[in-house]
Image: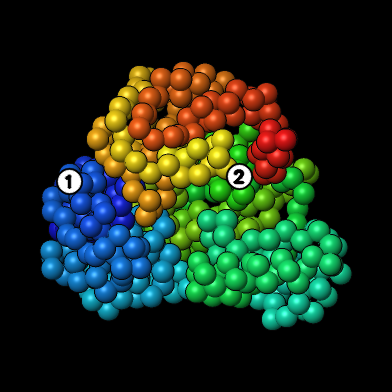
């Protein structure tokens, strides 16, 4: 096991990793920007290192500063969390070059799967169902138009190096293609430094269902059920649940086995998530693979009783998985609501400021993954998530009831939040019945705002 882990992240995921290290008896060091001097993760880690000013490019995305911090504190491993450098192959390579273990997959696997177009080709070669699309990145509008004419509209233009819903444009007709492709390329270049895009057929109103896998360096891969992430606004997840209301045991097995096949095809190890779209016929198609821990991992932990973050650290140290596929059992149902400092009435505008009063719910089946406290100042430099509220019940109805009262008890003053909006969604008949799809929230918001 490692002597010391450097956590190359901030906020609630940094706090989550610190807690996992403590349970494993591993010392941990945190990095922070000057804007995060008073952050919880910097206060509770065994030691903390300032790595730069607020701008992410000068701090949390500064690879050399992070590596130097690890060397200075004597860390033998780095956990990147999610976002920032977590899916950066060059950073994983730098870790290896400096004799530091990257708690994640190999840089070769990140390179293979980080390019969405190349990942799709890899999955197709492994026999995993994929959405019909272009063979790799398209180089011109003419090439994109040729595919669209053959496949039929609507189509999606997607950033090859994308993630987090960035660099995606829906195109409903030939006359829109050039403008939407240009917009997707520009956004891709701004966010990922790579303007290459690929094209795929747009599936109308599918469910977004992802399979969680964990793999060790000895070649063992298991899947831990699925999460339904269809409740999303503008490709940004809002509510997630586990298991999915549309997945039965047979579909779960087929999707899980496809995910395991995908991981083995890539020589993958550590935690990863294979995202699928499931259509009205319950046919599923590979969308992308995330080579990191996911924001919504707690609901999988609640339903399986398996600590994913501790497992990440253990398998990175060379330990084999402690559990086999036959031992994985889904118990009950879990729902996660992302609590953000934002104003839904003002197009979800971020709401930085100081939290003047805070009360978080508790009780049976309620979990809070957060990093804020009364008096904490939410800065404008990073994402607006305050915490993740997780409800675990004996079944889906029980989890919904628990989430409703937990949201009703959650108090945050000093900044605007989306708590009331989350409560509104949880009470919607479409959510209660499980009769919602990936486009539901966009349709609902369009109708709500008229």
What is the spatial separation of the Cα atoms under label 2 and label 1, in whole angstroms?
34 Å
Q: Quadrant of the N terminus?
A: bottom left
User: Taking 424 as reference, is 37 above or below it?
Assistant: below
User: Taking 196 as reference, is 323 above or below it?
Assistant: above
Q: Quadrant of residue 70?
A: bottom left
* Residue 422 placement (x, y as % from top left): 53, 30
Q: Earlier in the sequence, mark 2 or mark 1?
A: 1
* Residue 336 placement (x, y as % from top left): 48, 35
Q: Tell me the crowding category of disc 1: few under 14, some 14 to 19, or many 20 or more residues within 10 angstroms, Cα based.
A: some
Q: Which mark is residue 233?
A: 2
Secondary structure category for the residue under label 2:
strand
Contact between labelled residues 1 and 2, with CB atoms less than 8 Å apart? no
* Residue 248 placement (x, y as % from top left): 65, 36
Q: At 25% across and 58% down in the image, what residue appears?
A: 33
Q: Tell me the crowding category of disc 2: few under 14, some 14 to 19, or many 20 or more residues within 10 angstroms, Cα based.
A: some
Q: Quadrant of residue 320?
A: bottom left
Q: At 57% across and 60% down in the image, what residue appears?
A: 166
Q: 214 or 98, which is in the foreground? A: 98
Instruction: Tell me, yes or no, if residue 253 can be seen here.
Output: no
Secondary structure category for the residue under label 1:
helix
User: Taking 110 as reference, is 350 above or below it?
Assistant: above
Q: Which mark is residue 43?
A: 1
Q: In this image, 116 relative to 19: left or right?
A: right
Q: At 76% across and 77% down in the image, what residue appears?
A: 141
User: Taking 444 as reference, is 89 above or below it?
Assistant: below
* Residue 252 placement (x, y as % from top left): 61, 42
Q: In this image, 352 relative to 170: left or right?
A: left
Total marks drawn?
2
Q: Quadrant of the C terminus?
A: top right
Instruction: Tell me, yes or no, if residue 377 can be seen here.
Output: yes
Q: At 50% across and 58% down in the image, what residue appears?
A: 290
């Amino acid at each position: 096991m490692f002597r010391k882990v450097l956590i190359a992240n901030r906020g609630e995921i940094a706090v989550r990793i610190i807690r996992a290290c403590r349970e494993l008896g591993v010392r941990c060091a945190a990095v922070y920007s000057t804007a995060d001097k008073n952050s919880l993760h910097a206060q509770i880690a065994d030691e903390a290192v300032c790595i730069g000013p607020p701008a992410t490019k000068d701090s949390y995305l500064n690879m050399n500063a992070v590596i130097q911090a690890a060397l200075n504190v004597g860390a033998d491993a780095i956990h990147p969390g999610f976002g920032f450098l977590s899916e950066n192959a060059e950073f994983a390579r730098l870790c290896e070059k400096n004799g530091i273990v990257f708690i994640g997959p190999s840089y070769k696997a990140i390179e293979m799967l980080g390019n969405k177009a190349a990942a799709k080709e890899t999955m197709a070669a492994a026999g995993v169902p994929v959405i019909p699309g272009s063979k790799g990145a398209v180089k011109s509008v003419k090439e994109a138009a040729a595919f669209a004419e053959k496949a039929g509209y609507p189509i999606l233009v997607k950033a090859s190096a994308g993630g987090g819903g960035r660099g995606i444009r829906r195109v409903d007709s030939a006359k829109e293609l050039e403008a939407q492709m240009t917009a997707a390329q520009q956004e891709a270049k701004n966010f990922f430094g790579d303007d290459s895009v690929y094209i795929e057929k747009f599936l109308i109103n599918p469910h977004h269902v992802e399979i969680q896998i964990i793999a060790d360096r000895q070649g063992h891969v298991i899947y831990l059920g699925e999460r339904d992430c269809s409740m999303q606004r503008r490709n940004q997840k809002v509510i997630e649940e586990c298991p999915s209301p549309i997945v039965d045991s047979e579909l779960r097995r087929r999707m899980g086995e496809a995910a395991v096949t995908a991981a083995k095809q890539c020589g993958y190890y550590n935690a990863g998530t294979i995202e699928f779209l499931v259509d009205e016929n319950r046919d599923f198609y590979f969308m992308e693979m995330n080579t990191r821990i996911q924001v919504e991992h707690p609901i999988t932990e609640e339903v399986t009783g398996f600590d994913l973050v501790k497992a990440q650290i253990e398998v990175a140290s060379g330990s084999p998985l402690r559990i086999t596929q036959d031992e994985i059992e889904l118990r009950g149902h879990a729902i996660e609501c992302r609590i953000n400092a934002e104003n839904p009435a003002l197009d979800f505008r971020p709401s930085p400021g100081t939290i003047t009063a805070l009360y978080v719910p508790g009780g049976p089946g309620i979990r809070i993954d957060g990093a804020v406290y009364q008096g904490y100042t939410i800065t404008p430099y990073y994402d607006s998530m305050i915490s993740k509220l997780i409800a675990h019940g004996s079944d889906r109805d029980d989890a919904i009831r628990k989430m409703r009262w937990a949201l009703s008890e959650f108090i945050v003053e000093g900044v605007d939040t989306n708590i009331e909006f989350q409560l509104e969604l949880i009470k919607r008949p479409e959510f209660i019945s499980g009769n919602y799809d990936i486009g539901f929230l966009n349709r609902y918001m369009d109708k709500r705002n008229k």
